[in-house]
């Protein structure tokens, strides 16, 4: 973390210090190699034991099978690249590497630039930086709660449902459905009678699938339709064909079954609604003054609309973006702090000069700040890329088991095949080597940058 | 705030269970005051109601035995109570190491490094087979073997035997053929606990007619789905076919599998029978599936899983076991109801008198009864008295397990290679989750299962 801070001071920094010159000069007098070796030895041993040996052994191990006894050559690599699960993991890793560092760096830049100007900048920065203090595991559990499906528990869905319900109201009888789906057919607009009804007839509509305890207080015991409708009217009854405790005959009004008040009922002729009415407390309804002809009686879907359940954040489609959002929440502070440090190192006079020359604030930002800041941005970005390539904990904790394959990433896949049940450390090592190869360019890039800066 | 705090624990339990693979259960704390915890200290004498006196154990003064298991919290405390009489009798000291949920990841490196614990409790027979075949486990002595003969149905001895040698003593068991229901939901809908699968589906339909969401499925955790399948398959195809499928001697494309999946699809394929519909089920983890049924108001009427559901009910809901929450045995799909279960097997990694004495002690009813009385524990030991269980429910659970005798079958997915039967998001867990997502595709599910099985079993 200290390195980018150093680099941020580079633009316009003094030439190499004397000590650096001295080190370079001393290479000339290579008089005592034994002494040099003695000094190098402890560090080399530590490096070899802790770094080189594990890397080399991982590579060797990746050439053997699960038991570690049989040499399989590149077999594990073939398995790896022909396995659809690994492909999914690679695909997700690509999404991660493209999206996460970009968003984090951009947000960090925005926060850094904005906090430059505000009075309470330390407090603000502290708040943004705070998630960094939370472990991945804890953050994963927190975000599982955030993304909880039940709007009563998950914040994300509570917001989504709250906004949704502002624009559409809930229905009286969510989930209720006809007792006989053949007599009352489900259509795009709701349930409607399968056969047509002509004035002078009665319709009885038994509904189920709604808890008797949830009935409105005004609901009265259902009464059969009078059956003596006038020649120009259709009447009927809608009732809940299920009483508490069960029993009774399906499709018949039993003594303890109640009418469903407040339902909208429509009379439809040739596809257009000609009349509509509302059921009474005993579930009865009637259309009067209908012209002769054939009608269908419809109960519009709005009566039965299920309450909006929110978004399935951790479902197969949204799981990776949802986890990336959690990652951004954690790491935006990191990017902000580094970029802010770089920002404060930009010489004020350069900015002032631009302003004196008549540049707008946007131009100052675009043409002066950004170029001077680009080395820092690059370092932040590359560091994040390395960090994201090895992402594991968040995915493992946050993805429910049923969508884990959809959320899979390489580091998780590596753990899964070697320890998490697969118990094939050969294949796991192959994945590890592959991950190493992927991280390598980013690391080399960083190393070369540091070198170049030191050479300056 | 309280609810938030509660949710955190539930989620964490969920993670723990998901990782454990077979769910060694929530922490059951329904101990009647003053029975289990204090009884443990003098357990040797209080527990000796059956099985003929105490076990003759050697003197092991000054020895330390390391025991590793997945148990933490209350389970760890109860286990330490179990071994207390052993320590007093032999003079040995038990050093307990909790491995957390990833027991294989902890033990494998220790075995390779040459310093395994003396005794470990393995939650999966497959893991025991792996260790036995690599020569890490030590076969038990004749004393242990005869203690097992005396106290267990033969099926448990077979489960502890690899290549003709007995390696393990099954200490803890679970009955995974129990369907738990909300008593009020059932009475509101006028539904009786069903005995057969057809009655079960009909009951679910009636519940749905009554405006309730019938069955909660913890589909986010794959292991609950494998348990569903196993119960249907064992009851429908019978124990012999079950054993063959367990060993992958018949393929997953077999007609018997097709029949079982089609049977399951009667439930899984009808979203109105599932609490939260199909996608809701896939997002529900196991602890949530239980709290859905026993919360107020309930969001589902029943939930199927093992006896450890009781622990979740007591720890995470306000429902009272036996009055608000009851269970019925998994409905019979074929002629006979099935009893599928799980358990923890004690195995010795070192061939020393201490380890063997401990196994012998663990095979005795006295040892088991200490934990039985503390609650949250079902013993596969047939000489443990049903009266020792702290309440009617746990006694009934144990009774149906012991009564099943040799027709009891161990959880199939726990016996399969873990790449197939025990990995989150892979193998059978994933294939059955996909099947729950799309229950019409029986053929596709069978092919996916067979492909993954073939890979994992190495055929």
Image: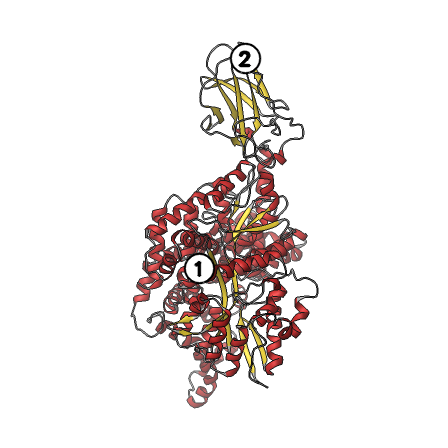
Residue A24 at x, y = what percent? 45, 79
Picture layout, residue A293 above or below residue B352: above
Q: Residue at x 30, y 73 (%)?
A: A71
Residue B58's image quarter?
A: bottom right
Q: Residues within 10 Å of mark 2 (few under 14, many from 20)?
A: some
Q: Is residue A335 visible?
A: no
Residue B94 at x, y = what percent? 58, 78
Residue B289 at x, y = what percent? 55, 50
Residue A309's image quarter?
A: top right
Q: Which residue is mark 2?
A: A233
Q: Nearer the viewer, residue B112 or A292?
A: A292
Number of marks: 2
Quadrant of the snapshot with the N terminus of chain A: bottom right
User: In this rendering, which labeled residue sits more in front, label 2 or label 1?
Assistant: 1
Q: Secondary structure at mark 2?
A: loop
Picture layout, residue B129 above or below residue A251: below
Residue A29's mark? none
Q: Marks 2 and 1, how far apart in space?
A: 67 Å
Do the residues at pointers 2 and 1 share their chain?
no
Q: Residues within 10 Å of mark 1 (few under 14, many from 20)?
A: some
Task: Kindly identify which chain the residue marked by label 2 belongs to.
Answer: A
Q: Nearer the viewer, residue B357 or A95?
A: B357
Q: Is residue B235 visible?
A: yes
Q: Nearer the viewer, residue A390 or B229?
A: B229
Picture layout, residue A133 above or below residue A203: below
Residue A410 left/right relative to B290: left
Residue B117 at x, y = what percent? 51, 77
Q: Secondary structure at mark 1?
A: helix
Q: Which residue is mark 1?
A: B407
Task: Kindly identify which chain the residue marked by label 1 belongs to.
Answer: B
């Amino acid at each position: 973390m200290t390195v980018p801070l150093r680099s941020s001071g580079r633009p316009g920094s003094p030439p190499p210090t004397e000590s650096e010159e001295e080190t370079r000069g001393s290479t000339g007098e290579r008089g005592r190699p034994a002494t040099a070796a003695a000094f190098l030895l402890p560090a080399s041993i530590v490096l070899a034991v802790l770094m080189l040996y594990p890397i080399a052994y991982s590579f060797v191990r990746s050439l053997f099978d699960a038991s570690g006894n049989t040499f399989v050559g590149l077999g594990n690599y073939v398995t790896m690249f022909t396995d659809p699960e690994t492909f999914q993991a690679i695909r997700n890793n690509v999404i991660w590497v493209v999206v996460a560092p970009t968003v984090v760096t951009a947000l960090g830049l925005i926060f850094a630039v904005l906090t430059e100007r505000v009075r309470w900048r330390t407090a603000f920065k502290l708040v943004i930086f705070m998630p960094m203090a939370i472990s991945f595991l804890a953050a994963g559990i927190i975000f599982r709660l955030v993304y909880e499906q039940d709007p009563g528990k998950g914040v994300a869905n509570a917001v989504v449902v709250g906004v949704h319900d502002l624009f559409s109201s809930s229905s009286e009888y969510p989930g209720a459905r006809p007792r006989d789906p053949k007599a009352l057919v489900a259509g795009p607009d709701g349930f409607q009678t399968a056969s047509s009804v002509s004035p002078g007839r009665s319709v009885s509509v038994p509904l189920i699938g709604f808890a008797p305890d949830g009935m409105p207080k005004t609901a009265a015991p259902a009464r059969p339709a009078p059956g003596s409708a006038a020649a120009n009217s259709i009447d009927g009854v809608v009732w809940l064909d299920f009483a508490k405790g069960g029993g009774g005959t399906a499709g018949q009004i039993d003594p303890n079954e109640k009418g469903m008040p407040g339902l909208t009922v429509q009379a439809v002729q040739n596809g257009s609604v000609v009349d509509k009415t509302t059921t009474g407390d005993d579930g009865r309804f009637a259309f009067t003054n209908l012209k002769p002809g054939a009608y269908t009686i419809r109960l519009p879907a709005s009566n039965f609309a299920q309450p909006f359940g929110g978004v399935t954040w951790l479902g197969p489609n949204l799981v990776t973006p949802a986890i990336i959002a959690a990652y951004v929440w954690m790491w935006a502070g990191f990017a902000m702090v580094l970029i802010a440090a770089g920002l404060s190192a930009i010489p004020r006079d350069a900015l002032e000069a631009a302003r004196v020359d008549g540049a707008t604030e946007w131009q100052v930002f675009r043409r002066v700040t950004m170029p001077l800041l680009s080395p820092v941005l690059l370092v932040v970005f590359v560091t994040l890329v390395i960090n994201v390539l090895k992402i594991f904990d968040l995915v493992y904790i946050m993805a429910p088991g049923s969508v884990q394959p959809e959320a899979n990433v390489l580091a998780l896949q590596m753990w899964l095949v070697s320890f998490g049940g697969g118990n094939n450390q050969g294949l796991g090592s192959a994945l590890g080597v592959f991950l190493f190869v992927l991280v390598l360019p980013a690391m080399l890039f960083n190393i070369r940058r540091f070198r170049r800066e030191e050479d300056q | 705030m309280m609810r938030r705090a509660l949710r955190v624990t539930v989620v964490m339990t969920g993670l723990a269970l998901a990782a454990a693979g077979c769910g060694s259960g929530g922490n059951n704390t329904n101990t009647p005051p003053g029975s289990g915890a204090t009884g443990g200290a003098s357990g040797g004498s209080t527990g000796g109601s059956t099985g003929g006196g105490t076990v003759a154990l050697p003197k092991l003064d000054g020895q330390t035995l390391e025991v590793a298991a997945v148990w933490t919290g209350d389970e760890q405390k109860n286990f330490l109570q179990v071994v207390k009489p052993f320590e007093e009798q032999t003079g040995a000291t038990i050093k307990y190491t909790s491995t957390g949920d990833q027991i294989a990841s902890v033990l494998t490196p220790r075995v390779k490094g040459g310093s395994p614990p003396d005794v470990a409790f393995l939650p999966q027979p497959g893991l025991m087979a792996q260790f036995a075949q690599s020569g890490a486990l030590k076969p038990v002595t004749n004393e242990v073997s005869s203690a097992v003969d005396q106290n267990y149905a033969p099926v448990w001895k077979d489960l502890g035997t690899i290549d003709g040698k007995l390696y393990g003593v099954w200490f803890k068991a679970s009955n995974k053929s129990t369907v738990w229901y909300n008593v009020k939901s059932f009475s509101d809908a006028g539904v009786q606990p069903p005995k057969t699968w057809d009655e079960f589906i009909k009951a679910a339909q009636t519940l749905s007619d009554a405006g309730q969401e019938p069955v909660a499925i913890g589909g986010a955790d794959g292991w609950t789905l494998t348990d569903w399948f196993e119960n249907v398959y064992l009851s429908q195809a019978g124990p012999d076919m079950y054993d063959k499928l367990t060993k992958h001697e018949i393929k997953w494309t077999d007609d018997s599998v097709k029949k079982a999946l089609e049977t399951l699809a009667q439930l899984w394929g009808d979203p109105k029978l599932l609490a939260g519909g199909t996608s809701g089920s896939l997002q529900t983890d196991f602890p949530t599936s239980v709290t859905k049924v026993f919360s107020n108001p309930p969001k589902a009427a029943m939930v199927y899983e093992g006896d450890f559901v009781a622990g979740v009910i007591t720890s995470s809901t306000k429902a009272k076991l036996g009055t608000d929450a009851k269970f019925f045995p998994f409905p019979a799909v074929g002629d006979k109801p099935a009893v599928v279960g799980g358990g923890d097997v004690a195995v010795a990694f070192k061939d020393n008198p201490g380890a063997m004495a401990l196994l012998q002690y663990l095979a005795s009813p006295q040892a088991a009864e200490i934990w039985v009385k503390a609650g949250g524990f079902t013993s596969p030991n047939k000489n443990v008295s049903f009266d020792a269980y702290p309440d009617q429910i746990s006694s009934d659970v144990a009774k149906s397990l012991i009564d099943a005798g040799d027709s009891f079958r161990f959880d199939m997915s726990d016996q399969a290679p873990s790449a197939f039967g025990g990995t989150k998001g892979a193998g059978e867990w994933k294939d059955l989750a996909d099947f729950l997502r799309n229950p019409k595709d029986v053929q596709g599910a069978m092919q996916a299962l067979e492909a993954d099985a073939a890979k994992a079993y190495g055929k």
